[in-house]
Amino acid sequence: MSSSPPTPDDWFALPSAPEQGAGLRFACTMCGNCCSGPSGFVLVNDTERTALAARLNISEAEFTTRFTTMLHIGRSLIEKPAPDQSARAMDCIFLDRDKFPGKAVCGVYEDRPRQCRTWPFWNSTLQNAESWARASRTCPGINKGALHELVQIRISRNVVDI
C-alpha cells in the first residue's frame, strides 16, 4: 500500500521525524494528564451523548442536564475540581482516580467521546515537531509504546478540530 507524499502539515511523515517518517509512538500510561488541568472542554455530539446516557442508564435529557454544559464551540462534558492540586486544576467529570490507586482511568472508557479517542493525534499537537514535543512534556505516553502508522494518525487528526 503506497502512502501519499508528506504535506507541510505532515512533519511526522518526513525522514527527520522521530520514527524516520513511519509514524509516531504513543501508549496511554493512565496518568490522567489529558483529562485534567486548567479548565477546558471535551466536546460531545448527539450520538456520543446518547451512548453515554445509555451507559449510565439515564435519559439523554438527564445526561445532558447533569453532565454537560453549552460553550461557544459546542456542548462539552462538565468538569470537577481535581483533588490535591491547585484551585484552578479541573478533572473531566468521568475521570476516576479511586478505582486503581496511582492511576487515573476513564469511567466511561468504552463510550468516551471521539475527542478522547483521538488523543494525542489532534491538529494542535501535530502542527509541528515543537507542538508534539510540548505535548510530550505533560503526556508521558507520547513517544513511547506502539507505533501508530501515518494513515491512522491522519484519520485521527481529522476526526476533531482541536
Image: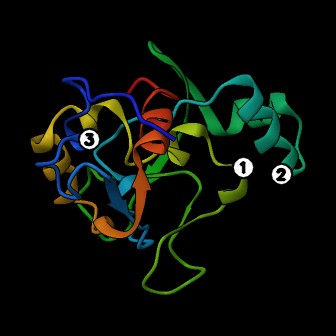
Does residue 74 appear left or right of residue 138 in this picture?
right
**Do residues under tags 2 and 1 come within 8 Å of each other at their CB atoms?**
yes
Q: Nearer the viewer, residue 89 or 49?
A: 49
Callouts 3 and 1 close, C-beta under 8 Å: no
Residue that carries the numbered disc 2 in the rendered image:
55
In percent of width and height, residue 3 lies at 41, 35
The residue that appears at 20% across and 54% down in the rendered structure is 20
Residue 154 seen by the camera: yes
Tell me the CA gap for discs 3 and 2: 38 Å
Amino acid at pointer 1: Asp
Relative to 147, say whether 7 is above or below: above
Element at label 2:
helix
**Mark 3 crowdedness (10 Å alpha carbons): few <14, some 14-19, many ≥20:** many
Write down the residue under mark 1.
Answer: 111
Q: Is residue 69 left or right of residue 135?
A: right
Q: Secondary structure at mark 1?
A: helix
Q: Amino acid at mark 2?
A: Arg
- What percent of the width, then of the height, locates residue 135? 22, 50
Q: Residue at x 83, y 51 (%)?
A: 55
Choose between 101 and 10: the one closer to the eye: 10
Where, quadrant-wise, is the C terminus in this rendering?
top left
Number of residues whose C-alpha sits closer than 10 Å to that of mark 2, classed few (under 14), some (14–19) or many (20 or more): few
Q: Circle 3 sits on which residue?
A: 13
Front in this rendered view, residue 13 or 48: 13
